[in-house]
Image (cartoon, grey):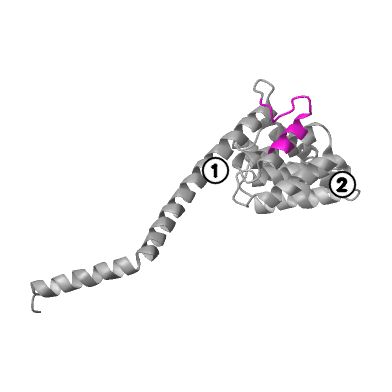
Amino acid sequence: MEPLDKNTEDDQLTLFMEWLLENRNHVAFIVIVSLGVGMMYYVKKVNAVAAEEEAAEDLLAAMTGDFQVAAVDQTKPPSERLQAVASNHSGTHAADNAGFLAASALFDERKYTESAKAFKVFQTTVTGGSPLAAAAAFGLAASLDASGDQVAAKAEYERVTNQHANAPEAPQARVALAKIILAESNPDKAKAKELLLAAAQESQAGRIPGFWGREAERLLAPLNMATPKESSNEEKPEPTEK
């Protein structure tokens, strides 16, 4: 290719300058928009950090009376304080945690029906990958169980064992589920024993808290013993000849 001569370069530079002058408003608009988008992203990021910090402060105040902020009324019960944080700071991580803690506080306050509703609401705000998903599922089942709705509780305990099989709450759900089964009028003792054996093994491996392991072994003990009916069906030894 032949190199451009001086006149050709000057012509091209002139054409470019004329284009730039004719379109300077358009170019300026593009530059301003680019700067504006960058600034908006920066401001949004800063605001998000500020929102998380404010929500975290309110959550800390709602959890303990040692730290106080104007937005949290310490005269209200823990469940109300925590629910206020969840409502006032929607979209933050602190709000998600506050929703779970509010449901748990309702359970501690023996408001089991309200606790079940709160756990259901929390489940709609978090994904299955949330570290609190299994705990919320177990909390819902326990709330239904404590409220006296064993049919619904049984279904929720089974959901925990199926959908969160590797979570710490799974063996706890197995023990609770076995207790419901054994309390039924015609209990499936084989199913209950299977659940309790699995929980006891996980307890021995140190994967569940001591209480649930002890409870599994307590419920398992009578199932391991032969009932009178079973004993009567056993073959009797032949009498020896004298």
Quarter of the image with the N terminus in it:
bottom left
Q: Nearer the viewer, residue 222 or 29?
A: 29
Q: What is the quadrant of residue 51 in the picture? A: top right
Residue at label 2?
149
Query: Which of the 4 image quadrants contains residue 80?
Result: top right
Residue 197 is left or right of residue 238, and the answer is: left
Please, what is the three-letter code of the amino acid marked with disc 1? Ala
Q: Of tags 1 and 2, which is closer to the observer?
A: 1
Residue 241 percent location from the top left of the image: 83, 44
- Quadrant for the C terminus, please: top right
- The mark that comes first in sequence, 1 or 2, is 1
Q: Secondary structure at mark 1?
A: helix
Q: Residue 16: where, in percent of width, then height? A: 25, 69
Labelled pair 1, 2 in contact (Cβ < 8 Å): no
Q: CA distance from mark 1 to mark 2?
A: 41 Å
Image position of 71 (left or right of 47): right
Q: Looking at the image, is 155 positioned above or below residue 146?
A: below
Q: 107 or 202: which is nearer to us? A: 107
Residue 181 on image: x %, y %: 82, 47
Q: Residues within 10 Å of mark 2 (few under 14, many from 20)?
A: some
Tag on residue 48? 1
Residue 175 belongs to magenta span: no
Task: Answer whether residue 73 is magenta in the image.
Answer: yes
* Label 2 secondary element: loop
Crowding near the residue tagged with mark 1, few <14, some 14–19, many ≥20 C-alpha atoms within 10 Å: some
Q: Which residues are magenta?
A: 69-85
Residue at far top of view? 66
The disc at residue 22 is none
Residue 54 is situated, as x and y percent measured from the top left of the image, at: 60, 34
Say whether residue 18 is visible: yes
Towards the viewer: 112 or 62: 62
